[in-house]
Image (spheres, rainbow, N blue to C red):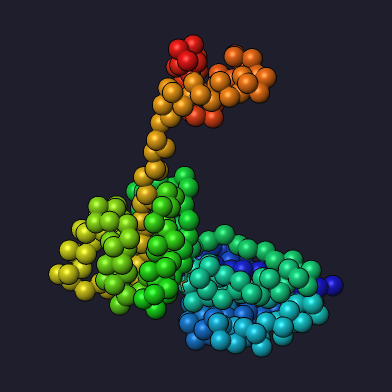
Amino acid sequence: MAGMLYLVPTPIGNLGDISPRCRETLEAADFIAAEDTRVSLKLLNHLGIRKSLVSYHQHNQNQKGQGIVDRILAGETCALVSDAGSPAISDPGEELVKQCAQAGITVCAIPGPCALVTALSISGQSTGRFCFEGFLSTAKKSRMEHLESLRKETRTMIFYEAPHKLLSTLEDMEKVFGPQRPISLCRELTKLHEEVIRTTLSGALALYAQQSPKGEFVLVVAGAEPEEKPQATAEEAAAQVARLMEQGLSRKDAVKQTAEALGLPKNLVYDAALNL
Ligand code: SAM
């Protein structure tokens, strides 16, 4: 019988955030695939777990992926961990999950620490609709293209960013989204110096002109204000009612349909149609 792949999230700063279920899964697995075996070894030592480790990262995932799939198909259970947070989210794992799914292997994701969810929930920005944009490219052209594609995005946007790239990212964001766009800079989450700076893009730039950014950041940027559709005029509404009546609709139905299509109150469309 085939084994299973478990995606095991690990703390993004505070070791207390490892859950009993994650610990049990790591203990029970036949082997652990780790982004950086040295980083994971520290965590395993802290947990008192001794287990065989396989390195699985961005640069060896093509060669290593099939080997891991084969071992699982042969009946072993694999726990995948990244350096911190949830595997497969801006971290190795995405390909392995695809390969396992294709091979008919059961994949189980254990919920747990994830920088983007932690940041969004304390950002103070709207959380109802959001999009995760991962890391922006280091190449200026594709970074700007990425941001340009988000110019009209109305959902809250979440980005991962490294401190040494933060200033240029904020500058580019200001160019595309404007200086007054609200941003929450969520820094060093779950760590001793955890901080959330809720400001605007120009405010963030002013702040980091005075001090250099340190630590790990998640940027939560407010979405654009929805564009207001220009209101249709009474004449346009009346003309549409007339067209629909010519096509055979009753005045009542034509008014109803026009009001819905143009987002206007029915009585306004009715009056406009009568004055035609
Ligand atoms: N898979 C991980 C997750 O979803 O939590 C993210 C891995 S990604 C390679 C690393 C990025 O996550 C960092 O550059 C930073 O943007 C963000 N991050 C990770 N830990 C963080 C923390 N404690 N505070 C703020 N951001 C963090």
Q: What is the x, y in percent for residue 172?
A: 31, 67
Q: Is residue 118 visible?
A: no
Q: Residue furthest left?
A: 210
Q: Which residue sits at x=49%, y=21%?
A: 238
Which quadrant of the view contains residue 165? bottom left
The answer to whether 9 appears left or right of 173 in the picture is right
The answer to whether 259 appears left or right of 140 in the picture is right
Q: Which residue sits at x=40%, y=31%?
A: 231
Q: Is 167 in front, or is 117?
A: 167
Which quadrant of the view contains residue 73? bottom right
Query: Relative to residue 253, is residue 96 depicted above or below?
Result: below
Q: What is the x, y in percent for residue 255?
A: 55, 18
Q: Is 267 in front, or is 156?
A: 267
Q: What is the x, y in percent for residue 111?
A: 57, 59
Q: Is residue 38 visible?
A: yes
Q: Which residue sits at x=63%, y=63%?
A: 109
The answer to whether 165 appears left or right of 23 in the picture is left
Which quadrant of the view contains residue 260? top right
What count of labels does the image hold? 0
Ligand number 1: quarter of image: bottom left
Q: Which residue sits at x=84%, y=72%?
A: 1
Q: Residue furthest right?
A: 1
Q: Is 239 in front, or is 141?
A: 239
Q: Is 39 in front, or is 152?
A: 152
